[in-house]
Amino acid sequence: MKTFSRTFACFIFFLVSHLSTAYPFEGPLQVKNLYPIFLHADQPYIEKAGMESSMAYSLSHSSTYTVQTSGDWVINLDMEITELNFRYKRIIKDTVEFDIDIPVVIIGGGFMDGFLEDYHSTFGFPDYGRSQRPNNEFLYEVRKDGDLIIKGKSGTRLGDIRLAIKKLFMTYDGFNLSVKGDMELPVGNAKKGYGNGNIDAGLSVLLDKKITDTIMTYVTLGAIFPGDVRGHEKLNLKNFVYGGAGVEAVVRGGLSLLVQLQGQSPIYPETDLLAVDRDAYLLAIGGRYKTGKKSVELSLTEDINAAGAPDFILNLTYKINL
């Protein structure tokens, strides 16, 4: 996907160079890890420390291929996931920010395998065995010691709903520092791959630092305490830590370019599978256009460690400041 990233970045730059309007900083790209077996373990965002009242509608599409076995584990993931996410934020009495995320998850065989096969073949990139399976054929199965844990089913269902509170503790001269706590409620079906069937919790520290009048940086550090997966059999998940940093640069008027990197430690117990046991790292690049109280952002996220993340994530977000 490296060549695709460069092409995507050039497109964003071309778009930016032809539009202009007044612009305030809006925060990092609103993307999260859509890796199927990690998606429901309260997957975090990189966020700005400053508080806001807003509502946003995000459309994210990802492709994942992990078909691997070890002595104790079978993890078969060949699918595409689309998530439609509604995010609402409200500042309460100028004291705290209340957030709610309501996702709708669409899981299926998808439509991109033919394109990805041609792409990997053209540029000589490894396909991790994707070409050995029929194109766009859905597969989602997790087993441990022969026992079935998740037997995914294609379809459209409500995912786990997240509630959060953010408190701003420090702000001066282009610097913000806040703390955020969240809880994810078990709404999605765990046996079929739409949730984990348990309550998850998270805690993070958020930092914003303005470098110049046109460049803002964001840092997020946190820990997640996921509940067990209550599938066909119960599976204990690890507590995990994560971190990320992003840069937002105003290029012209209401347009900005954004780059961010985030990583997280493993979530599953030891599986002896490289695609699951290693740290996950995601690199996102994109652009945002803002006019008045409304903004639109487009981004591409890549898995740069071939572990714990989809091959790519495309995201489109529309946000309204209230």
Image: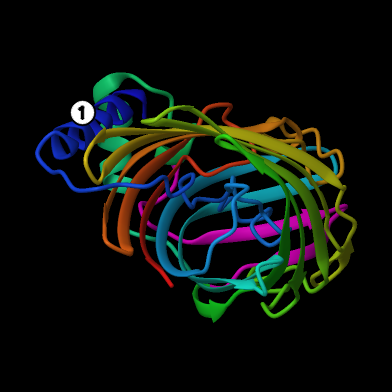
In the rendered image, the vertical position of residue 58 relative to residue 156, given as above or below: above
Q: Give the quarter of the image for residue 109.
A: bottom left
In the rendered image, the vertical position of residue 308 relative to residue 91, given as above or below: above
Judging depth in this view, the residue of 299 and 87 nearest the camera is 87
- Residue shown at 42%/58% (left/top)? 60
Q: What's drawn in magenta, residue-wise?
A: 132-153
Q: Is residue 41 left or right of residue 215?
A: right
Q: Residue furthest toward the front?
A: 173
Q: Give the quarter of the image for residue 240.
A: top right
Q: Is residue 202 left or right of residue 264?
A: right
Residue 180, position in %: x, y?
Answer: 75, 55
Q: From this viewpoint, is residue 261 visible?
A: no
Residue 182, position in %: x, y?
Answer: 76, 63
Q: From this viewpoint, is residue 76 visible?
A: yes
Residue 108, position in %: x, y?
Answer: 45, 66
Asked whether residue 142 is drawn in magenta, I would say yes
Q: Residues within 10 Å of mark 1 (few under 14, many from 20)?
A: few
- Residue indicated by mark 1: 10
Residue 282, position in %: x, y?
Answer: 54, 35
Q: The disc labelled 1 sits on which kind of residue?
A: Cys
Asked whether residue 75 is drawn in magenta, I would say no
